[in-house]
Image (spheres, rainbow, N blue to C red):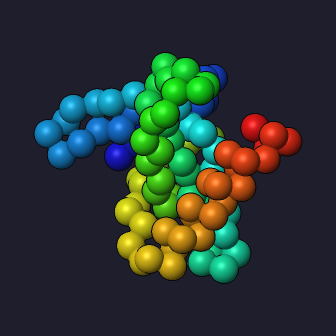
Amino acid sequence: MAKQNQDENLITLVDEQGNETLYQELFNFHSDDYDKSYILLIPAGSEPEEQVDVLAFAFNPDENDDSQDYELFDIESDEEWEMVEGVLDTFLNDENMR
Protein backbone atom coordinates (compact mmCIF):
# COMPACT_ATOMS: atom_id res chain seq x y z
CA MET A 1 0.00 0.00 0.00
CA ALA A 2 1.08 3.57 -0.61
CA LYS A 3 0.10 6.67 1.33
CA GLN A 4 0.60 9.98 -0.43
CA ASN A 5 1.34 13.37 1.10
CA GLN A 6 -0.07 15.66 -1.62
CA ASP A 7 1.87 18.75 -0.49
CA GLU A 8 5.34 17.38 -1.08
CA ASN A 9 4.83 14.50 -3.54
CA LEU A 10 6.01 12.15 -0.81
CA ILE A 11 4.78 8.59 -0.71
CA THR A 12 5.14 6.13 2.12
CA LEU A 13 5.50 2.52 1.02
CA VAL A 14 4.46 -0.09 3.56
CA ASP A 15 5.94 -3.58 3.24
CA GLU A 16 4.49 -6.91 4.39
CA GLN A 17 5.96 -6.47 7.89
CA GLY A 18 4.41 -3.02 8.29
CA ASN A 19 7.70 -1.15 7.85
CA GLU A 20 7.28 2.27 6.27
CA THR A 21 9.78 3.83 3.86
CA LEU A 22 9.46 7.36 2.50
CA TYR A 23 9.87 8.03 -1.23
CA GLN A 24 9.44 11.05 -3.45
CA GLU A 25 7.46 10.88 -6.67
CA LEU A 26 9.77 11.49 -9.60
CA PHE A 27 6.86 11.57 -12.04
CA ASN A 28 3.85 9.58 -13.18
CA PHE A 29 2.34 8.96 -16.58
CA HIS A 30 -0.38 7.05 -18.39
CA SER A 31 0.30 4.61 -21.23
CA ASP A 32 -2.46 4.30 -23.79
CA ASP A 33 -0.77 1.16 -25.16
CA TYR A 34 -1.18 -0.67 -21.84
CA ASP A 35 -4.12 1.39 -20.55
CA LYS A 36 -2.33 1.78 -17.23
CA SER A 37 -0.83 4.55 -15.16
CA TYR A 38 2.70 4.31 -13.81
CA ILE A 39 4.54 6.06 -11.02
CA LEU A 40 8.30 6.33 -10.58
CA LEU A 41 9.74 6.88 -7.11
CA ILE A 42 13.12 7.79 -5.64
CA PRO A 43 14.19 7.72 -1.98
CA ALA A 44 13.05 10.87 -0.17
CA GLY A 45 15.85 13.32 0.48
CA SER A 46 17.93 12.24 -2.51
CA GLU A 47 20.20 14.89 -3.95
CA PRO A 48 19.58 15.88 -7.61
CA GLU A 49 22.88 14.48 -8.93
CA GLU A 50 22.96 11.47 -6.59
CA GLN A 51 22.67 8.05 -8.21
CA VAL A 52 19.69 6.24 -6.73
CA ASP A 53 17.53 3.27 -7.57
CA VAL A 54 14.27 4.29 -9.19
CA LEU A 55 11.24 2.22 -8.26
CA ALA A 56 8.47 1.89 -10.82
CA PHE A 57 4.94 0.64 -10.27
CA ALA A 58 1.65 0.52 -12.10
CA PHE A 59 -1.26 2.08 -10.22
CA ASN A 60 -4.92 2.95 -10.58
CA PRO A 61 -5.35 6.67 -9.99
CA ASP A 62 -8.44 7.88 -8.21
CA GLU A 63 -10.82 9.42 -10.74
CA ASN A 64 -11.35 12.43 -8.47
CA ASP A 65 -7.63 12.56 -7.62
CA ASP A 66 -8.50 13.12 -3.96
CA SER A 67 -7.48 9.79 -2.46
CA GLN A 68 -4.33 9.68 -0.40
CA ASP A 69 -4.13 5.88 -0.27
CA TYR A 70 -3.87 3.68 -3.31
CA GLU A 71 -2.49 0.33 -4.31
CA LEU A 72 0.66 -0.08 -6.36
CA PHE A 73 1.14 -3.04 -8.67
CA ASP A 74 4.32 -4.71 -9.86
CA ILE A 75 5.16 -4.34 -13.53
CA GLU A 76 5.06 -7.89 -14.79
CA SER A 77 6.02 -8.08 -18.45
CA ASP A 78 9.37 -7.35 -20.08
CA GLU A 79 7.59 -5.25 -22.70
CA GLU A 80 6.08 -3.02 -20.01
CA TRP A 81 9.48 -2.65 -18.32
CA GLU A 82 11.07 -1.64 -21.62
CA MET A 83 8.37 0.99 -22.17
CA VAL A 84 8.77 2.39 -18.63
CA GLU A 85 12.57 2.45 -18.98
CA GLY A 86 12.20 4.31 -22.29
CA VAL A 87 10.00 6.95 -20.66
CA LEU A 88 12.46 7.26 -17.75
CA ASP A 89 15.41 7.64 -20.15
CA THR A 90 13.54 10.37 -22.02
CA PHE A 91 12.76 12.13 -18.74
CA LEU A 92 16.36 11.96 -17.53
CA ASN A 93 17.87 13.10 -20.82
CA ASP A 94 15.45 15.92 -21.69
CA GLU A 95 16.13 19.13 -19.74
CA ASN A 96 12.64 20.43 -20.58
CA MET A 97 10.92 17.54 -18.81
CA ARG A 98 12.54 18.01 -15.40
Location of residue 83 in the rendering, given as x and y in whole percent from the top left corner? 59, 70
**Residue plotted at (42% across, 54% down):** 72
| Image height of 33 relative to 19, above or below | below
Residue 15 is left or right of residue 71, and the answer is: left
Q: Is residue 50 visible from the viewing direction of this image?
A: yes
Residue 98 is left or right of residue 82, and the answer is: right
| Image height of 29 relative to 5, above or below | below
| Image height of 48 relative to 29, above or below | above
Q: How many numbered marks are there?
A: 0
| Image height of 71 relative to 98, above or below | below
Residue 54 is left or right of residue 88, and the answer is: left
Location of residue 58 in the rendering, given as x and y in whole percent from the top left corner? 49, 61
Location of residue 71 in the rendering, given as x and y in whole percent from the top left corner? 41, 53
Quarter of the image for residue 67 reads top right
Residue 96 is left or right of residue 82, and the answer is: right
Q: Is residue 5 visible from the viewing direction of this image?
A: no
**Residue plotted at (49% across, 68% down):** 81
**Residue plotted at (18% across, 46% down):** 16
**Residue sticking out furthest to the left:** 17
Of residues 70 and 47, the one drawn nearer to the viewer in this rendering: 47
**Residue plotted at (24% across, 42% down):** 15
Location of residue 42 in the rendering, given as x and y in whole percent from the top left corner? 49, 36
Viewport quadrant of the C terminus: top right
